């Protein structure tokens, strides 16, 4: 005979219902626990009484004490000792009397004061003097010197620059050429070459004015021409 169980006594038939109920109960506990922890959270607000907690005490700034050095000892001053001399020496005034003739005629002679005058040597640069400066050998020698010593700049040759550069300089008392400068130029390269040639000239015969050698300003044209 087979043992028969009643449907009410079979627990396996209600397994799904019990599982669903247990899941609902577990979710309910979890929800209650979350709600409980959220209500327990409190936000601490600072009140006026609690502000004193964050007050920091200011520490006074102290400086190290400076040690003052003792003043130097006073210097020993030398005191002059005055010696008192007895005034018991008789002093005799020796005065010579000269007999003057009241009727004599006195002659007054005036001596003019001697005034020392300094001779100032003026270093004047003359433009025109009695004897003008001259290149050794004359003007022909000067032209020959310039044509033989001028080096035509390559850049000026390529650009076709040519013309007359007028250079002014000073012939010193010893014939030295000083202060050469371009009065009228053509281009920077030709001007520079003209100044170089004038500066390298030998000493000239200096100019003469009133029998003295003087400084004279002189002007020389330097010609640059392409062939």
Image (cartoon, rainbow, N blue to C red):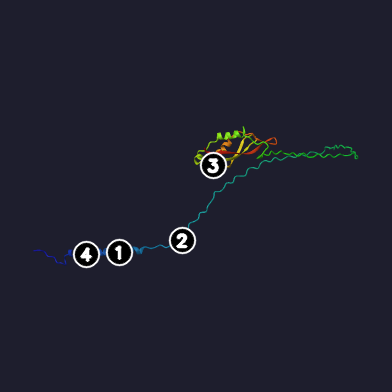
State the separation of the CA atoms marked 4 and 3.
115 Å
Residue located 20% across and 64% down the image: 16
State the separation of the CA atoms marked 2 and 3.
84 Å
Residue located 22% across and 64% down the image: 18
| Element type where label 3 sits in the image | helix
Dividing the picture into quadrants, the one containing residue 13 is: bottom left
State the separation of the CA atoms marked 1 and 4.
20 Å
Residue where numbered disc 2 is placed: 51
Residue where numbered disc 4 is placed: 18
Q: Which mark is residue 31?
A: 1
User: Which of labels 2 and 3 is toward the front?
Assistant: 3
Along the viewing direction, whichever of 16 and 217 lies nearer the viewer: 217
Q: Residues within 10 Å of mark 2 (few under 14, many from 20)?
A: few
Along the viewing direction, whichever of 138 and 194 lies nearer the viewer: 138
State the separation of the CA atoms marked 3 and 1.
100 Å
Q: Residues within 10 Å of mark 4 (few under 14, many from 20)?
A: few
In the picture, measured across the screen, residue 132 lies left or right of residue 22, that is right
Residue where numbered disc 3 is placed: 188
User: Which of labels 3 and 1 is toward the front?
Assistant: 3
| Element type where label 2 sits in the image | helix
User: Residue 194's x, y, as percent?
Assistant: 56, 38
In the picture, measured across the screen, residue 108 lies left or right of residue 216, that is right
| Element type where label 4 sits in the image | helix
Q: Which mark is residue 151?
A: none
């Amino acid at each position: 005979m087979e043992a028969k169980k009643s449907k009410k006594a079979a627990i396996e038939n209600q397994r799904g219902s019990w599982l669903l109920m247990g899941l609902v109960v577990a979710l309910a506990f979890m929800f209650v626990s979350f709600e409980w922890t959220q209500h327990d959270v409190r936000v601490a607000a600072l009140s006026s009484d609690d502000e004193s907690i964050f007050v920091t005490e200011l520490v006074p700034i102290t400086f190290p004490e400076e040690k003052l050095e003792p003043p130097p000892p006073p210097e020993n001053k030398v005191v002059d000792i005055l010696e008192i001399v007895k005034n018991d020496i008789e002093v005799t005034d020796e005065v010579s009397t000269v007999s003057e003739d009241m009727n004599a005629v006195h002659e007054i002679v005036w001596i003019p004061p001697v005034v020392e005058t300094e001779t100032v040597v003026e270093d004047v640069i003359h433009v025109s003097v009695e004897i003008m400066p001259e290149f050794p050998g004359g003007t022909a020698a000067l032209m020959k010197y310039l044509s033989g010593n001028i080096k035509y700049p390559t850049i000026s040759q390529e650009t076709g620059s040519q013309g007359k550069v007028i250079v002014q300089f000073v012939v010193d008392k010893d014939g030295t050429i000083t202060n050469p400068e371009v009065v009228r130029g053509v281009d920077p390269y030709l001007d520079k070459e003209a100044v170089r040639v004038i500066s390298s000239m030998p000493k000239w015969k200096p100019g003469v004015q009133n029998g003295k050698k003087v400084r004279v300003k002189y002007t020389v044209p330097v010609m640059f021409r392409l062939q």
